[in-house]
Image (spheres, grey):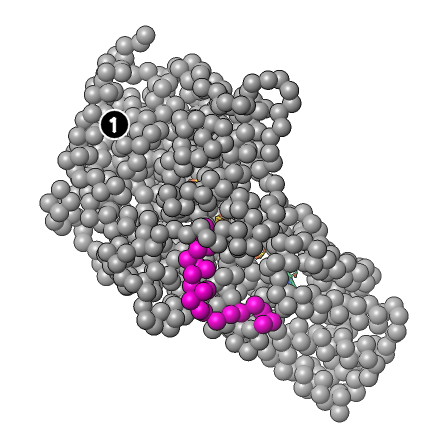
Amino acid sequence: MLSTLYAVLFYVATILLVVGTAMKVAKYARTPAPLKIPVHPAPRTKKGVVLRMGREVLFFESLFKSNRWIWVFGFLFHWGMLLVLLRHLRYFTQPVWWWVELIQPFGVYAGFAMVAGLLGLLARRIVVERIRYISSPSDYLMLLLIIGIGVTGLGMKFVLPVDIIAVKAFFLGLMRFQILDLPTDAAVLIHLGLVAILMIIFPISKLIHAPGLFFAPSRTQVDNAREFRHLSAWASQLPPLPEGIPTKEEGK
Amino acid sequence: MAPHDMNTDDAPKVVGDPFKMPKIECGASMDTNTYKAAPEHNEPLGFPGELLDNWQEVAIAKIGELAEKNRAFQVYLDTCVKCGACTDKCHYFLGTGDPKNMPVARQDLLRSVYRRYYTFAGKYFPWLVGARDLTKEVLDEWYTYYHQCSQCRRCSVACPYGIDTAEISMAAREILDSVGVGQKYCNEIIAKLKKTGNNLGLNPKALRATLEDLEEDLEDETGVAVKLPLDVQGADILLITPSADFFAEPHIDGLLGYAKVFHAAGVSWTISSYASEAANFGMFIGSYENMREVSWRIRQAAKDLGVKRIIFGECGHAWRVGYSFLNTLAGPFDFLDQNYPIPQHIMEFTSDAIDDGMLKIDKSKNDEFVMTYHDSCNVARGSSMGRQVGGQFDLPRKVMKAVCNHFHDMERDTIRENTFCCGGGGGLLTDDLMDLRIKGAKPRMTALQQVTADHGVTHMAAICAICKTQFSKVMPKYGYEMDNIMSVHQLVANAVILDGQEED
Ligand code: HEM
Ligand code: SF4
Ligand code: SF4
Ligand code: SF4
């Protein structure tokens, strides 16, 4: 019964995550940027933009320059989360890919780094008056949600071990459209329930920043407006303006 | 002259910190409002004269329209994670302490409404994501705080996603205009430009008389007949410069500088009475159509006069429009000489003239000044110059160092891409916002006071007409004289020695 519920939950969450994110990305890609608005100093070549974005995505370059504390916590959290996610691939692959095996030990420490980073971000949100001012309930809840995922995850690893083989079997089953038994430990159910919630809200919340970042004109545009026109489809439909000066006397 | 109170004794100078965090005070600048436009200011721009009866409906529809027409608007509204990195970056927040002047809070004024009507979470769980209905109070709040943003983009540099509050401010002003709530200062000026070709409403006759007077002054000073040509058919270069260059100080001295450089370089050039304005306030109000119409005049004038090149004078946002938008808005400029960038900045021209040895320079003429340079934000973060990335920072400094012996930069985090706005940009250079302008200038002024204390800097130069006017008004509030702000080409004018010039 519970297994069926969780199976359905994960199918639904996966569909919402994939379809929702794809729709958002399609919308961003479709929406024209009518003017060149890179924030300078901006690269003048495509290659330069790729490097700029690489530094932003991998190192959070701008954040590093603008706020060191947020950078430290954000960096711990995101890189921790990335390693943790990659480590989780072992629950979805049989046999486990060699490089996923390789990162297993790091993945565990990454879990701590991730939670530490999240706690730091939460603390800032509460303690720093400026950030408290701009926070809505969803901003706190989002952090608590991911902290919850991290803490239950670490809990299963270090405090209350669960039958991880059965969990893996459950997910491998889902991938073949079979519903096998899911262990019913509270930690498993909470952990997986929170993950499903995260997947569902991803496309309809600020979490969309992950793909959104690649569509921000201020960072992704090449600085070449003097060399190339950048006319959007709707702007090219505007009524034409007169060539030459029509009524020379008018201004005089 | 040295600014008073500053260089008088040898005790360690205690000056403020440009980044000093203000005490947060809700509503601190709530009552600072700029005058609203009258119907005769709004209508020539294609906006309703007064607040529409169904304004709410129209405004909400406009938000949707902008989200479909402008990727920046859509993506920025969706992706902000409220990390807070931008919260301490705005000079108006640092100057007023009003939390709604924190960039992300400024965005949220609009984002909250966007969420309410256009997102799942905002429609069904408004309290969760801070979504709210569009009420008259919200509209008024937009008017207030979107006219406390100079669209300087300092916050965008700080944001991990480059979220540009200037784009949100421009969109908000466009929404306000579309329901009939315009700002008098900007809309009146655009209407004037459409009639006369410049922001001042100066007619060609008056312009010609002004230029002739200046020619006389130049000849008296140098003994050389340096021309300021107007409407000369077939000239090589069309100069597009802010109309403030024709009458305000220190702007005029900059204009004389361009004239001397052109003269020394031996090129033929002209000003156009039809496009006698570089400024394009269409950008401030976020109106593509108005910005395009204003830009189009430059194309018309260039074609009509049969020039080969277009060069822009010292004007910050004009150069952003010129460098980043002009080709898109009014191109293609296939009728101009393709061997030069279109358009070009006077700083690029002067820099090349220096490199080519076309200017005879006596740096000592500027020895009475200990200079620093204010990177105007639209030049710094909205455009570039020259052949290298960062030319917008390096070329003006190079030119200044070529004509002055004493130059010191202000603190690194207050210049170049991190420059603080003068406090008067983005359509806020109006007397009814004087209180805001003085407060918004504080970070820049504090950084200036630092170099005055450390290096004895006496004067600051800029290449933005708005900055120059703003500084000449607010510098006296910070212990300087109004003529402690200079044009970069004023320094050039001082140092250039023309062939045949009588030297004393
Ligand atoms: C391309 C991948 C991603 C990049 C470059 C990225 C970048 C960032 C940056 C720069 C911040 C602001 C600093 C901070 O608060 O940490 C941030 C915040 C955040 N990110 Fe990401 N992110 C990515 C993917 C994700 C994903 C996949 C998730 C979650 C599923 C996520 C969750 C969050 C959350 C919750 C915050 C807000 C933290 C807070 O409340 O302070 N990010 N992200
Ligand atoms: S664009 Fe400039 S004035 Fe506007 S919010 Fe950002 S920092 Fe402040
Ligand atoms: S820095 Fe960018 S993401 Fe962070 S709060 Fe400001 S606008 Fe939002
Ligand atoms: S006036 Fe000058 S400093 Fe201020 S907004 Fe414009 S370019 Fe920026």
Q: Work out whether residue B63 can be spotted.
A: yes
The stretch of residues the image draws in magenta is B127-148
Q: Is mark 1 within 8 Å of ligand 4?
A: no
Report the residue at 37% width, 18% height from top: B495
Report the residue at 63% width, 68% height from top: A138
Q: Viewer-proximal residue, B178 or B159?
A: B178
In what quadrant does ligand 4 lie?
top left
Q: Viewer-proximal residue, B127 or A92?
A: B127
Which element type, helix, strand or loop, lies under badge 1? loop
Q: Viewer-proximal residue, A102 or B96?
A: B96
Measuring from the top left, give residue A141's x and y in whole percent: 67, 69
Report the residue at 74% width, 80% height from top: A171
Name the residue tied to disc 1: B267
Measuring from the top left, give residue A240's x and y in whole percent: 22, 58
In which quadrant of the rendered view does residue B51 lie?
bottom left
Q: Viewer-proximal residue, A176 or B474?
A: B474
Measuring from the top left, give residue B238's x and y in whole percent: 24, 36
The answer to whether A141 appears left or right of B306 in the picture is: right
Residue sitting at the far bottom: A1
Report the residue at 56% width, 60% height from top: B80
Q: Is residue B141 magenta?
A: yes
The answer to whether A2 appears left or right of B268 in the picture is: right
Q: Work out whether residue B342 can be spotted.
A: no
Q: Is residue B17 magenta?
A: no
The answer to whether A180 appears left or right of A208 in the picture is: right
Indicate whether B442 appears above or below A195.
above
Quarter of the rendering occupied by the C terminus of chain B: top left
The answer to whether A35 appears left or right of B259 in the picture is: right
- Few, some or many C-alpha atoms within 10 Å of disc 1 (few <14, some 14-19, many ≥20)? few
